[in-house]
Image (cartoon, rainbow, N blue to C red):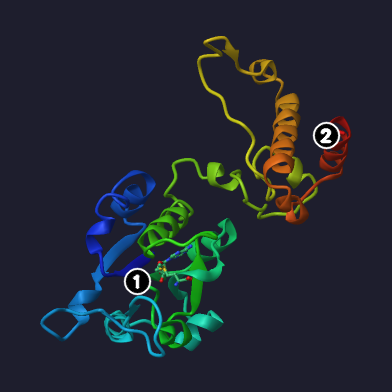
Amino acid sequence: MKADILTIFPGFFQGPLDHGITRRACEMGLAKIEVHDLRQFTHDKHRTVDDRPFGGGEGMVLKPEPLFECLETLQLASRDDRITGRAKQSVTLLSAQGQRFTQQVAAELAGLDRIVLVCGRYEGVDERVADYLADRELSIGDYVLSGGELGAAVIIEAVMRLLPGAVGNEASTRQESFTAHERTEPGAADSTCGSGGLLDYPHYTRPADFRGMPVPEVLLNGDHQEIRRWRRQRALEKTLRNRPDLLDGAQLSDEDAKILARIKRDNG
Ligand code: SAM
């Protein structure tokens, strides 16, 4: 996969993308990330990338010219082909007003050959970028950041770890929080491998007793059926407690429904 980031702060990405799985994916040749400095696509001696908003109002707006000119050098497929899926490419504008970036969107982006991330700044980006250049707007959460750079780094990290081969043990990315089952055969939702859209179950490692805080006994007894049931119950409990909204879209088995009913009964 090729990822391009368009930003007025290219130095921002020295560090966040140089570690862990993202670095590994690049070193293994699974991904290539290129950061483009928007000031290189300006034509005045001050390398101006912003201007005052038409109609008045607060702050400055990121001008369209550097963004359009930079994108044109990338030689992407047309916006139409990207939107219809004829080209496995996407141009994303980072925006607090965008659709929420989720694990499902990360998986969708991981299936593409090329992703381009456009980082806004100031009061935002000239709207013609959203209307004519980008094919989607993504928000990393309901809060306002000063720029799209952190969002771009978040998206790159979430997407890169889903590239086949990027994570040593691929099963680990399938069982994580929010991850739906790829297959729907009977019993899939019972499996330890696959959260089915729930939050992940708790993980423990050595020592078995740390400062008087023991690892749950069930994980030490080697009974894999019992471990599976315990993990599923913990995942259901945590999802109900922290993210009950996820239960609506989760793949729940009859056994899950019974566990949930029991948890709700026990909690009054
Ligand atoms: N005026 C905008 C609004 O109220 O929605 C906020 C602009 S913000 C200060 C500047 C830039 O930061 C945006 O253009 C966008 O690229 C980025 N940004 C801010 N919050 C974001 C979020 N939650 N997700 C993704 N990008 C965000």
Q: Quadrant of the N terminus?
A: bottom left
Q: Secondary structure at mark 2?
A: helix
The x, y position of residue 73, in whole percent, is 26, 82
Residue positioned most to the bottom: 55
Which amino acid does the dot numbered 2 rest on? Ile
Which amino acid does the dot numbered 1 rest on? Tyr
The x, y position of residue 52, in whole percent, is 32, 84
Other-residue count near label 1 (Cα within 10 Å), few / some / many at <14 / 14–19 / ≥20: some
- Report the side of 204 relative to 74 (left or right): right
The label number, if any, that marks residue 122 in the structure image:
1
Residue drawn at x 41%, y 90% as measured from the top left = 55
Q: Quadrant of the C terminus?
A: top right
The quarter of the picture where residue 228 lies is top right
Residue drawn at x 38%, y 57% as measured from the top left = 150
Residue drawn at x 25%, y 64% as measured from the top left = 9
The x, y position of residue 265, in whole percent, is 89, 34
The x, y position of residue 262, in whole percent, is 87, 34
Q: Is residue 135 above or below residue 196?
A: below
Q: Secondary structure at mark 1?
A: loop
Q: Is mark 1 within 8 Å of ligand 1?
A: yes
Marks 2 and 1: CB-CB under 8 Å? Answer: no
> Is residue 86 in sight in this rendering?
no
Pick the residue in front: 240 or 60.
60
Q: Which residue is mark 2?
A: 263
Circle nearer the viewer, 2 or 1: 1
Pick the residue in front: 172 or 259.
259
Residue drawn at x 70%, y 42% as measured from the top left = 239
The quarter of the picture where residue 155 lies is bottom left
Tell which quarter ligand 1 is in. Answer: bottom left
Q: Earlier in the sequence, mark 2 or mark 1?
A: 1
